[in-house]
Amino acid sequence: MVNGKRAVERCDFLGIAPYSDTEDGLYRGYLTPAYAASQRVIARWMTEAGMTTRIDAAGNLVGRYEGAGSRPALIIGSHLDSVRDAGRYDGPLGIMLGIECVAVLSAMQERLSFPIEIYAFGDEEGSRFPLAMLTSRAVAGVLECDIEEPVDSAGASLSDALASYGLETQAPVAADVPGLQAARHPGALAYLEAHIEQGPVLESEGLALGNVTGIAAQRRFSAFVSGRAGHAGTTAMMLRRDAFAAAAAMVLAAEECARAEDADRVATVGSIIVGPGAANVVPGAARFTLDVRAATDEACAALADAILAKFGAIAAERSVTLSVDALHHLPASPSDSRLLELMDAAIADEGLPARRLVSGAGHDAMILSALCPTAMLFIRCREGISHNPAESVTAEDCTLAGRVMLRFIKLLEDFHGA
Ligand SMILES: [Zn+2]
């Protein structure tokens, strides 16, 4: 039987030093001492569950449970790294549940027509180097970065960190980019990731699990509002061109636009800088970010267009100038439609309603979709809290998640093996 309690306890075990790089609170960076210590323990758990283990060229820990056929591997994974002052389940829980699934198959001496490989990805959060999902990009063969470039806060480059971890980095991966030879050839049968929801939907509906339809499209902009600075005491209100007041109106307009749409569409202004920034000066400049997400590329573009049109109208009304730069655009990453149906069936076989939902947050699954069909299972977390030590899940929900994952694996066997 799947042991969800053990999966939770193992995440808790990894939540403190030496499996955390900080004594207070959890922080596990990519290729740090805590990362190495965690890999050693998890490798032991993988071995006990009947797997062989290796560390790939990107520093990912990989456990492999052999199959009886010649089909490509099913990858089950999530990330081992964390943000600073993190919760214990964001990432590691998906790895632990994968190990639990293999432990069950191994105990029953059951071999499938495909091997299972459990990946503990090294860098998803981007909390050490300013690059997220670095190691899943390497595995999917879509990493485009010069490993000399990213530098951590202590001044160590990514290539230094890899070298001191004992990893070879000389050979080119793609084009002429020297990098991480972790790409899989010829690919994989499928990728399955279980992850805490990091949102409140499942809890508010009284559901333990959700079937993730895909990862939301994301557009990010930098907006610059230019008005006219002036004396706070002598500039008449009617004559002001206050850049901060205009930006504030834009922030509220973004919120209003997103609220008018369905719940899958969100818009956030998370950062603003006002200049010149003195109590006795009317602000002449304001720069802020806008992050827009929606389930589909079309919906995301439509919401972003609507918000930017409002910004333009506000700028004209208030006689300030507005310029907007697109910072990045991440297309939506839908789960595979056949795997979505298998996951619905696996959830229904456990007697649970098959609730489908979109992920507003990015995950390694969106990267792995370049390699193979992907599926994700969300697990209810208390009050939707994540990236916070208060992150919490129940052992019962995790047991259910593991049971659904095992059913999914069996359905995949029948589906492809027939
Ligand atoms: Zn995560």
Image: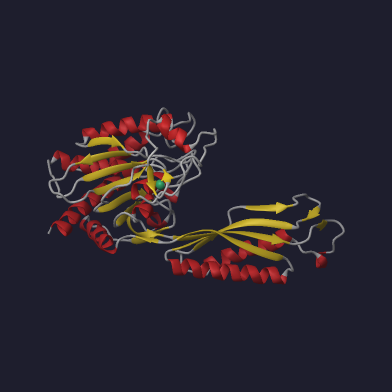
| Whether residue 153 is visible | yes
Q: Residue furthest right?
A: 234
For the residue pair 118 and 139, the one nearer the viewer reads as: 139
Q: Residue furthest front?
A: 176
Q: Residue at x 33, y 60 (%)?
A: 335
For the residue pair 398 and 142, the one nearer the viewer reads as: 142
* Quarter of the figure with the C terminus: bottom left
Q: Position of residue 190 (x, y in %)?
A: 26, 54
Q: Residue at x 70, y 53 (%)?
A: 274
Q: Position of residue 208 (x, y in %)?
A: 32, 53
* Quarter of the figure with the N terminus: top left
Q: Position of residue 171 (x, y in %)?
A: 37, 40
* Residue 88 falls left or right of residue 239: left
In the rendered view, tell whether residue 268 sits above or below residue 31.
Answer: below
| Whether residue 394 is visible | no
Tell me the colour scheme of the image: secondary structure
Q: Residue at x 31, y 30 (%)?
A: 41
Image quadrant in which you'd find residue 64: top left
* Residue 157 falls left or right of residue 57: right
In the rendered view, tell whether residue 281 sits above or below residue 22.
Answer: below
Q: How many marks?
A: 0
Image quadrant in which you'd find residue 49: top left
* Residue 181 falls left or right of residue 51: right
Q: Position of residue 115 (x, y in %)?
A: 19, 46
